[in-house]
Image (cartoon, helix red, strand yellow):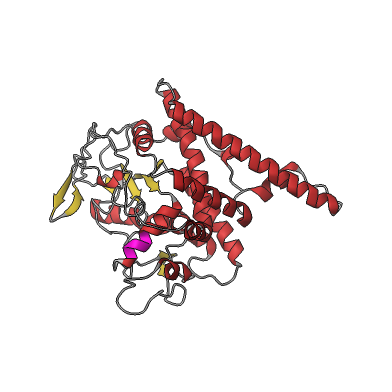
Amino acid sequence: MISSSTFPPLAEIKSTTSVGCCRTPGVKGILFLGYVLCNGSNCALQKSNPASFRNNYEAYFADENEKKHCDCLTANKEVWLFSRYSTGWKCGLHADWTELKACVNDYFQETYGHKRRRYFYVTLLRDPVKRFISEWLHVNRGATWKSASLKCNGQEASIRDVPFCFTGRDWRGVTLMEFMACKHNLAINRQTRMLANLSKANCYNSTGMTEEERNSIILESAKENLMDMAFFGLSEYQNYTQFLFEHTLNLHFVEDFKQHESTHTSRQPISQDDLNKVARLNYLDIELYQFAKDLFLQRVHEAFIEEDIPVPADLMYELETRAKHADANFNQHQSQDGAKNAKEGKVISETNNLDKFVVNNKDSARENADSLVDDLRDDPR
């Protein structure tokens, strides 16, 4: 199992990217893995306007026909930023990690010729509860993803594997309770699914393994892929996301990212009970997000040290608070497991206790969900 103790140092990540990810024409490129509604109307890495980099290559996002578009070209006129705003949906509508890995190299080879290339994956994660509610609001207004191919192992998911949650043209007017009630709704734990290598879990075919086994495989895969990414950010930390991006990839934005305090999601009158239900439903995304947050804050901390910049007090406080919370949770679970096993006359090692505590434990994940929902009430981001 992957826990925060297995995080690689930031220097190890930078060693593969620090030369400036796009300075050698035709060899390197950044791929943006974009989640559905990763940050409401504020996906900074996608939509900064202008997003000109202080580097060899510039990327101006121009408003063409009321649609964001990026002319992200090298000196050889080859796209170096692969995202919906530069290339369109070349690998499918909202392509996930599984689809991108199978598609991107073929696209570049066919479009720009056969040569050896390196691809640096970057993405943004969003608070799972806010992201889910944001997607519900989007669907409520009539949005659908019917044209998404959901490819895995060269085949598209069948309607039997992923049935629609609605009949007719769209799901306009769906209530939050109805949105949560459809067990085939891909909005549920979307971030974990989109970041995982689904071929490890028999793609979208849920037969052949239990739900618990499948969820464990997907969550572990999502963590592994997140750790291997050149960069990822958190939409709730726009300033640290920009700082870490620039530090890691040696690319600099002209304009600073902005933290939007008011979003469509934050303005919704949703009860605490309903927030709890959303969090428990998305417990895989909750666990992934907590893992990502630990890794992200650690990398930001290391970046400040490497830049010889004083570490902000709020960052140090959050790191210390999260560390204390993790220790308290571990000790509590260790004590509970110890008492239970003592009655059974068993001796469980500290390693096994840790295995019981980490991500695959539904109860632990749902406790994290409850904690996160409490934080939402105090944090408008």
Q: Give the range drawn in magenta.
A: 135-139
Q: Where is residue 373 in the image (x, y as percent from the top left)?
A: 49, 50
* Residue at screen point 36% across, 79% down: 167
Magenta-drawn stretch, dominant element (helix, strand or loop): helix
Inspect the magenta stretch and tell me whether residue 136 lies in it. yes
* Residue at screen point 80% across, 51% down: 341
Q: Position of residue 365 (x, y in %)?
A: 58, 53
Q: Position of residue 8 (x, y in %)?
A: 52, 36
Frontmost residue, 109 versus 214? 214
Quadrant of the image occupied by residue 94: bottom left
Residue 279 at least partly seen: yes
In the image, taking residue 21 as reference, residue 290 lies left or right, namely: right
* Residue at screen point 27% across, 34% down: 256
Inspect the magenta stretch and tell me whether residue 230 lies in it. no
- The quadrant of the rendering that contains the C terminus is top left
Frontmost residue, 183 versus 89? 183
In the image, taking residue 333 as reference, residue 238 lies left or right, namely: left
Q: Position of residue 363 (x, y in %)?
A: 63, 55
